Image (spheres, coloured by chain):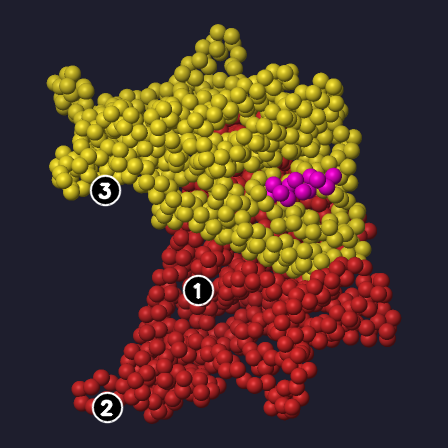
Chain colours: A red, B yellow
Amino acid sequence: SKEDFDLAFIYVSDAQYNRNIFFDTSPQSVRLYILYNHWVAQVLLYFFILVDLSLAIFEEPAVVATPIWATMLVELLCLLVFTVRLVHYAKVIPRDKFWKDAKNICIIVILMLTLVDIIIYGALKAADCYAVRWSRVLRPLLLVNVTEGRQLRRAFRSIRNALPQIFYVFLLFMFSVLIFSLMALKLLGKRGLKTTEGTPYFTNYMEIVFELYVLVTTANSPDVMMPAYNASFVFAIFFILYILVNTYIFMSVFLAVVYNNYKKYLKEEVRQLVRAKRHKMVRAFAVLQEQREEGAEPVVSQANWNQVVRLVQPDISNAHRELLWSVSDHQTQGCIGKVEFVQLADLLNIEVITLKSRPHPLSKLCPSLYLSAPSRFICWIVQHKAFVIVYDLIILVNAVFIGLDEDNPIIANSEWGFLTLYLLEILLKLYVFEPRAFFSRNSFWNWFDTIIVVSALVATIINSAVKTSGGFTSRQILDIVFILRVLRLIRVVDSIKRFRTIINTLIRIGPAILTFGQLIIVVYYIFAMVGMELFKGKVKFSEDPSDPLRESCGNALLKGSVFAQLNYCKNNFNNVVSSFILLVELTVVNQWHDILYLNASDGFTAVTHVSARIFFVLFHIMVVIIIINIFVAFVLEAFFVEY
Amino acid sequence: SKEDFDLAFIYVSDAQYNRNIFFDTSPQSVRLYILYNHWVAQVLLYFFILVDLSLAIFEEPAVVATPIWATMLVELLCLLVFTVRLVHYAKVIPRDKFWKDAKNICIIVILMLTLVDIIIYGALKAADCYAVRWSRVLRPLLLVNVTEGRQLRRAFRSIRNALPQIFYVFLLFMFSVLIFSLMALKLLGKRGLKTTEGTPYFTNYMEIVFELYVLVTTANSPDVMMPAYNASFVFAIFFILYILVNTYIFMSVFLAVVYNNYKKYLKEEVRQLVRAKRHKMVRAFAVLQEQREEGAEPVVSQANWNQVVRLVQPDISNAHRELLWSVSDHQTQGCIGKVEFVQLADLLNIEVITLKSRPHPLSKLCPSLYLSAPSRFICWIVQHKAFVIVYDLIILVNAVFIGLDEDNPIIANSEWGFLTLYLLEILLKLYVFEPRAFFSRNSFWNWFDTIIVVSALVATIINSAVKTSGGFTSRQILDIVFILRVLRLIRVVDSIKRFRTIINTLIRIGPAILTFGQLIIVVYYIFAMVGMELFKGKVKFSEDPSDPLRESCGNALLKGSVFAQLNYCKNNFNNVVSSFILLVELTVVNQWHDILYLNASDGFTAVTHVSARIFFVLFHIMVVIIIINIFVAFVLEAFFVEY
Ligand code: NA
């Protein structure tokens, strides 16, 4: 019946996309569940999550100032969408399952807290009181907890499971820092040394601990050492030992522990995934199965199988479907057993590359011309090794021309020559190779080339048009033209086999990097929200270079400080964009103690105070010690598998 | 015969210590070879290598100024010793083998070049001309090439073999840097932006390449980005992308490639080592073997075996030797075959821990007292868990007391109390546990405790004596007292099981770290010698704080520079000690562009010039990209094996 096929379809599709939801199997629920998984519903959900997250751009402190009621209305709309989605989900799965799942509770709590926060905030603002939009911290957690955020949730779960191990290493590491600090206090505290700013050097234990924590990140090396080193070179040995133990050994141990544990739990998760997938397929089989003979094993007929496959993948070609069937039914019995049926989910995920060497369309249209001697000669040339080498040389010459001054008319006009050469190359290749094969899904470099060259052509034409018509050049268009020109040069790496292997390995970790990107955005978002509440408006950046406030970043306390001298005024938490850029700078770690203007010896603690230190140390542990190490582990793993 | 035993002895001992030398088997050569491997000869050799390397302390630019003739005489003496050693080696192995071995040729070339250099240098100095002691660069290569430097040579060979792979990744990395630089030039060069110092920003391609190379090391983040970021936040995306690709991805790829290749070649080396070891043992067997019956397998008798073992390990106890024999001759036939004999080299390397629970000496001396109820009560207490906890608490209280001001008389006197408590603990433990078991080779923490506490006692007594007699406190003694006091606190980690596992893993990589330490000293030494010739005397550090030269580091060009402001004057190449410390700072990477005072925008290139950049980039590739990654790989590997 139709309902059975729906049920089987949803089981197979769950298995194919690694969904692990125990939905109610009543016909109505199944129909709702199919709707729940429809791509439109999912895209809408992600769109509203994106809108919800983007609200930070419009809320105080805003990049684009917007009235409070507008952002609140949009947020309420988002909340409504999330609630509808959750109710939809609740209708799909059994009630007891719904309430047992932590992620649903989590979403409900987030929605409720956000609503409460909106009301309180609105009321306080209406009464002109000071108010904090604290629930914004919770927004990225929605991204983690929606059912579609499986990859991300898995990553977070793996981190959570790895935490105990990391925690013990961290304790030992902190013990080491504390011991070294105590030694530093005893060795250097009573010597009456002075820092460059003339303040006492290493006399306060907590200050020393902080300075030495900064030294682990290498950000204050060698400055922190200089007063002691100037007193005697023996003290340098103390600092070198400290760096060896804490920067090199402990940071490597963190990498090792994160790598090991994260991989271990991720493997466990993948194993569970495979089990769940099998379970779903077995259920689908149970729905479709029929007993051909008394006492025989149940089977699924080709007709039923076809119908399910058509439901799961409507755009599948007949040839592809028949191929899948012949793989499953290798004994050509017209029906398949459980074992063969279970494979279907994986079979559907395999990309079938049709390597049929189709004849070139031109050889059909005008064979006499296409197969003539000159045409064949062209084909021979284009397929020759020398053709690649010649074009690599053209790229190199092009690189030199790009490097030269583009105001020179000869250089400017040479661009047309290069564009013609690149276009000619693409046209020649299209003449020689079958176009569908040339633009197949796996031909990364063909796509890359064509898109870049065509875009460059369009941008260059627009640029010339703008120039000749108005006599001026739009900076934005010119920027795009330059970027495209330089990107064209990248193509050269594909000619060298060694490079190709490395790049292919990097491309293969692409999906992992995407999950990782979401992970880091969640963490950044939380820290950005907290950072904005703590530090917004403390420093100001003025666009006007003649503004006298520029010298002190709009804060009298910062006049003459390292922060202002280094021109760091724009490194602030005054809006979400600069917060994110600041957090990237903190991830890179260098100069972070100056960026957070909390270098106590400068006497600028009044600007922020000690909370900035706690803020950074937490950020450092979370992002640099845990997340960046996971990223490094991903890259390492990819290369270990490769070589 | 004696000669046969000598030959067998040297084969087994070669196998045991992983020596792989094809010596001549004539009786005379064997006797010479035994002499060659004598520990006194080896210690002497290392001593003279150390002396040769230490000469850098006394040569211009010197830490301790010494007349040229003195250092030259010592160096000639060293050369003589190395020559004698080499001649000795040449007598031991067949002539053709000697000349085929690259390391011998290498040593000969180094010795000759050094001699030539000494003569030229001496002559030039005598004629008061400018002269460079260029052969000093070759000195650490002696350390690599002496036959005893096997571990180190293996490490270098592995690096050399891994170089092609690293080189390809480096090419791709440099390509990426060049492409990004070109893009930066095109995007930012024509915008008329200015750096904080007011110089044009990103207008010169080679400058951009260098700035972006520095950014890979993160040393100029976020400064290099600020002018562009101040112009528009869009440019920050360019830099973030750059850091993602080049700092995070490429540096991880370097780690992966270094890790993989180094481990691969090291494994291959170890495999060869095992083969060579087996080969040596087979040869020893061939010397000792006898045919008991016609047609039977040849065997080695227990008597012969005993004699060889006694030669190889003169200090072996009879019990231990009998144990080894019974392991080999498990069928108690009184003789062993080839397979069992070959194991001997490995058996000798196994440390046998005698776990015999010997009775406490006191229980023999006065059993009535030792076994009395109060005595047993003491034993029960000391072995109780609470005893450890009480002492951990004492350590914590002690930590707080150390942190407090030691000028306070109560605090100062409390030290005697703590010392007494710690001594009491050791005495109690010695009372309860058998002393030889307590001080066994594997009881790291017992040794640690006892040495630290006894040293602290001695130092504190000396300190008090000095104080009461002269009324003043020697700063050096006080420093030692403080260090010992703080070190005592470390013991607390041994009480926590989780910490113990981590620390044991770290202790296990100790030997690897030693090889690694030699590796880095070789590289540092070479760079220090080159650096001293290039940069000596460019800046000066004045001990006197009132010296006006201090502001400009003794170089008018540096007046008001970042280098002088940051008080970096002591970061110079003026002698070998400060060169080494400077190289450590460069290894840590932070602020290196300021340390090498080659920040072009400062206008101080006149002090050094572009060679400083090449110097650093080479150093960065060699030390940070290759050697530090090998170190990280070691730590990772140790933890992967552990968990
Ligand atoms: Na840094």
Q: Nearer the viewer, residue B373 or B68?
A: B68
- Which residue position is annotated with label 1? A153
Report helix, strand or loop for mark 1.
helix
Residue A458 x %, y %: 74, 75
- Which residue position is annotated with label 3? B339
| Amino acid type, residue under disc 2 in the picture | Arg
Q: Residues within 10 Å of mark 1 (few under 14, many from 20)?
A: many
Q: Indicate which label's residue lies in the foreground, 1 or 2.
A: 2
Numbered mark located on residue B301 in the image: none
Residue B554 x %, y %: 74, 27
Report helix, strand or loop for mark 3.
helix
Quadrant housing the N terminus of chain B: top left
Q: Is residue A398 above or below residue A40?
A: above
Label 1 residue near ligand 1, CB within 8 Å? no
Write the residue at 44% across / 80% down: A36
Q: Specify the segment rendered in magenta.
A: B609-620
Write the residue at 26% across / 24% down: B2
Q: Nearer the viewer, residue A436 or A612?
A: A436
Residue B610 is covered by the magenta coloring: yes
- Which residue position is annotated with label 2? A292
Residue B427 is covered by the magenta coloring: no
Apparent side of residue A221 relative to residue B432 in the rendered image (left or right)? right
| Amino acid type, residue under disc 1 in the picture | Arg
Q: Indicate which label's residue lies in the foreground, 3 or 1.
A: 3
| Name of the residue lying farthest toward the top | B469
**Residue A351 seen by the camera:** yes
Q: CA distance from mark 1 to mark 2?
A: 44 Å
